[in-house]
Image: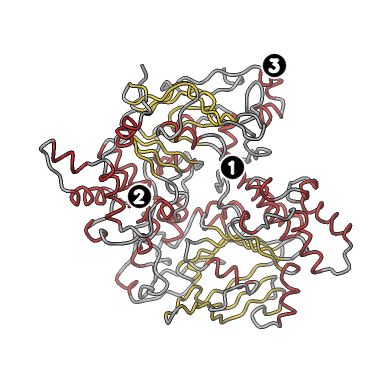
Amino acid sequence: MAGLLDIQDLSVTYRTGGEDLAAVRGVTLSIASGESVGVAGESGCGKSTLASTVLRLQPKNAVVTGQVLVGGNDVLTMRWGHLRAVRWSDASVVFQGALHSLNPVQRVGDQIAEPIRLHDAYASKAQAQSRVGELLEQVGLTAARARSYPHQLSGGQRQRVMIAMALACRPALVVADEPTTALDVMVQAQVLKVLTDLVGELGLGLMLISHDLSVLATTCDRVVVMYAGRIIEEASASTVFAHPRHPYSAALAAAFPRVGDPAARFAPAGLAGDPPDPRRLPTGCCFHPRCPIAIEACRTVDPPLESVSVGHPVACIRAGEPQPAIPVRAAV
Amino acid sequence: MGGGLLSGRDVEVTFRGRGGRPDAKGVDGVDIDIAAGEIVALVGESGCGKTTLARTLLGLERPSAGEVRYDDHPLRYSTRAMRGYRRQVQLILQDPTGALNPRQSVYESVAEGLRIHHVVDRSRKSGQQVNESDLVARALSRAGLRPPERFFLSYPHELSGGQRQRVVIAGALALEPDVLIADEPVSSLDASIRGEILALLLKLRDELGLSVLVVTHDLGLAWNIADRIAVMYLGRIVEIGSTEEVLGAPRHPYTRALLSVVPEIDQIEPVVLRGETPDPSRIPSGCRFHPRCPALLDGTAADRGIAEECVSRPLQVLPATGAHRAACWLVD
């Protein structure tokens, strides 16, 4: 299947001072045009590494195996010149923390225009300027904002400038890594609305990365959940959020409670323990030390990703059992 | 007067405008009570004044009008009086990595407050001598780091994010305070850790009878742990009541909008407010929320014949009684 983005059996290992750190372990994922896919997981689960390899932005000490096809071309093996052409115009990335990604002494309009000028040598200054105005309006800002410096904008506005910049060269695929994490609920809602509208209107493919499963559930069509560098569950967004089959997905889904749910009142949900150290991954299923429903076999068997129903693969040896009730209440 | 252990009456905090700019009213008239053993959530967008109000209740900021009362006495701001007060009311910050000194062991971090307040010296004078390491161990153990001795010599970089936040909480507990003020206590933590820290705050309330003021923009968190909620907008509390009342039957259009953008799967139509929290140096006339109010924009207020009041007639400060109240012309 030639999708917009096709990641095949991708593994990324960081070589750090003699120790190897497996950040991504055998991830397969594809995204079609007009589709938004959410990647959920906690810090250290490999989701940001996954995002960086889409445009070969991973650091030098990363050893990468597998394939990352963007529009059918393998990003990992392509020549440098080709890669430069793919970045921005085929696929672009919106990172977290716009304040640190924008140049503080350049007007935001000039920053948005930069990829346009670099990728289209024939674009006149006036053309670039009108495109910048168009882009700013697309993300819900006025064209006049082009003359502002980053410090004159609020956090939500800066994040929208980052999205405008990512759209500058009309890419088919946008990867957004925690684009709303530092923002307030209301501003988060505004930014997410901009992103979903763009997917609908421009037929973009969107890969949205977040630790907040509820954000992904409302924004994306499909969600994959990662733990310790692996995909452990993949399904439609509503299924992962409302009927997760992996105990880790269940814990993530319950971490952000439904306001008004009597079961969550004075009963915050959580998991015991901490995410595993990628240098010393547990044996068997990596999740077993924290798993509320682990059995003896989980210590030794590393479960493969297997479908429990159509389009719903889960990596858990108990996923096939008739709906076990997964306890999610936090202990102290 | 007042039913609170810690309360604010008509609190105003003004920041002097620099370079000819007008003064900004961070807090513009707030009445609030936090009773013994009660968890109150102060919610609102960034810039609404919730952190300034929390700092004022802590005595870190002096109100330009009104007063803060603790245990039925107005706060005194002499160095000596403040030192005593700071033992009773402790602050827990958002980012445990920033709050801990990276070169201090866990023991040193937790013992620091005890030393500043000469707890051990004083106990010797009073004849009931205590041992510093016993106090540190007890605080760590209450914060869920068990066995405590195992953590004495650890450094922050050796701990996970959740453990670091527990060390910060232990540092606050060591002084046996009556009130904790927690500013976004879980927003920098991973989803699965968050529940554990919230469960810890609940346990401290239940077992030690602590009062907690949680400052947050996260309504799910408030639903998880708070007895009462105060919703703040542009320096004022615009709605206050029990968590069930405020989140179950919100009256103020602002509270309704905030609730509607909490990401959920069976989502009600989100009311995405335009713009961000306006400037506290230019507070709008009439109801301060009117420029963004959906009820005014869609004509509901005009139909009820109160649009004129929304725009021009200021609202009273909500009293700090137990009843569910909202500062809105539509409600009264």
Badge 1 and badge 2 in a common chain:
yes
What chain is tagged by disc 2? B
Mark positioned earlier in the residue sequence (1 or 2)? 2
Amino acid at dot 2:
Val
Amino acid at dot 3:
Gly
Disc 3 marks which residue?
A: B305
Measuring from the top left, give residue B189's x and y in whole percent: 44, 54
| Residue in view at x 49 percent, y 71 percent | A230
**Disc 3 element:** loop
Measuring from the top left, give residue B152's x and y in whole percent: 25, 58
Say the numbered circle drawn on residue B261: 1
Instruction: Please say if B5 is above or below A147.
Output: above
What chain is tagged by disc 3? B
**Disc 1 element:** loop
Residue B188 appears left or right of A197: left
Q: Nearer the viewer, residue B209 or B158?
A: B158
Disc 2 marks which residue?
A: B168
Mark positioned earlier in the residue sequence (3 or 2)? 2
Amino acid at dot 1:
Val
Instruction: Please say if A152 is above or below B178.
Output: below
